[in-house]
């Protein structure tokens, strides 16, 4: 009699929740990120378009307010607002995207660096605006390398703290390994864009 192969059911793994958990821990462990309320950030997973614009992007922060946390923006005689997104009864301030497979194919420490990089873009006032680094190059200032230097020490400390946790097992896997080991899913949503509310 031939042995019968038994299929084991894969454990479900929500990538959005895993990253949200990491963000919450970062905000609790480091003073420079203590202004962040992880409950008001929606973590989503997007797909990189092969060979297209954005094909090299690992992560993206989308602010849901304008400069200084303004609800509206006047441009060319028209008023614009960002869509209002509610999650678990709370109005969100940011949507944070991580892109598959590019982000998930990074080495574990590089994944952590990308998470810290995107979080550092958040305004210290946590008002829905970005951290403005310069008059011309608002997002990164004069140098992306200098921008990364502001949080690199914390990223290394956090990475070391994760060494003996289950998170490290997940971070060590690339996109293919995650799909093989788990039943992987994540939150997906079109990138919110400003809409005209008045002329």
Image (cartoon, rainbow, N blue to C red):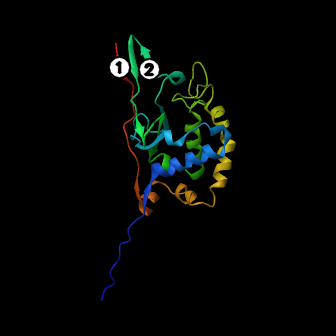
- Report how far apart the C-alphas of labels 2 and 1 lie in the structure: 9 Å
Of residues 133 and 83, which is closer to you in this image? Answer: 83
Answer left or right for 44 relative to 2. right
For image coordinates 49% across by 36% down, the residue present is 60
Residue 100 position (above or below residue 162): above
- Image quadrant in which you'd find residue 165: bottom right
Residue under label 1, please give it.
197
Circle 2 SS class:
strand
- Image quadrant in which you'd find residue 123: top right
**Residue 50 place in picture, x, y as percent:** 39, 41
Residue 122 position (above or below residue 4): above
Of residues 48 and 17, which is closer to you in this image? Answer: 17
Residue 157 position (above or below residue 189): below
Split into 4 quadrants, where in the image is the C terminus?
Answer: top left
For image coordinates 59% across by 44% down, the residue present is 113
Name, please, the residue furthest toward the top. Answer: 77
For image coordinates 39% across by 28% down, the residue present is 193
Circle 1 SS class:
strand
Residue under label 2, please give it.
72
- Image quadrant in which you'd find residue 75: top left
For image coordinates 61% across by 36% down, the residue present is 35
Name, please, the residue furthest toward the bottom. Answer: 1
Of residues 90 and 117, which is closer to you in this image? Answer: 90
**Residue 157 place in picture, x, y as percent:** 68, 49
């Amino acid at each position: 009699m031939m042995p019968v192969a038994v299929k084991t059911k894969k454990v479900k793994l929500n990538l959005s929740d895993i990253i949200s958990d990491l963000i919450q821990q970062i905000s609790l462990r480091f003073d420079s990120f203590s202004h962040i309320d992880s409950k008001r950030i929606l973590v989503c997973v997007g797909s990189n378009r092969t060979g297209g614009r954005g094909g090299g992007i690992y992560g993206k922060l989308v602010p849901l307010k304008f400069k200084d946390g303004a609800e509206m923006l006047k441009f060319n005689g028209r008023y614009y607002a960002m869509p209002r997104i509610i999650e678990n009864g709370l109005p969100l301030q940011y949507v944070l995207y991580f892109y598959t497979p590019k982000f998930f194919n990074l080495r574990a420490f590089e994944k952590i660096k990308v998470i810290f990089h995107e979080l550092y873009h958040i305004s210290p006032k946590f008002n829905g605006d970005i951290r403005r680094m310069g008059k011309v190059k608002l997002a990164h200032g004069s140098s992306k390398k200098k921008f990364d230097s502001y949080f690199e020490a914390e990223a290394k400390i956090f990475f070391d703290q994760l060494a003996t946790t289950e998170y490290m097992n997940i971070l060590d896997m690339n996109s293919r390994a995650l799909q093989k080991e788990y039943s992987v899913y994540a939150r997906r949503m079109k990138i919110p864009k400003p809409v005209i509310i008045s002329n």
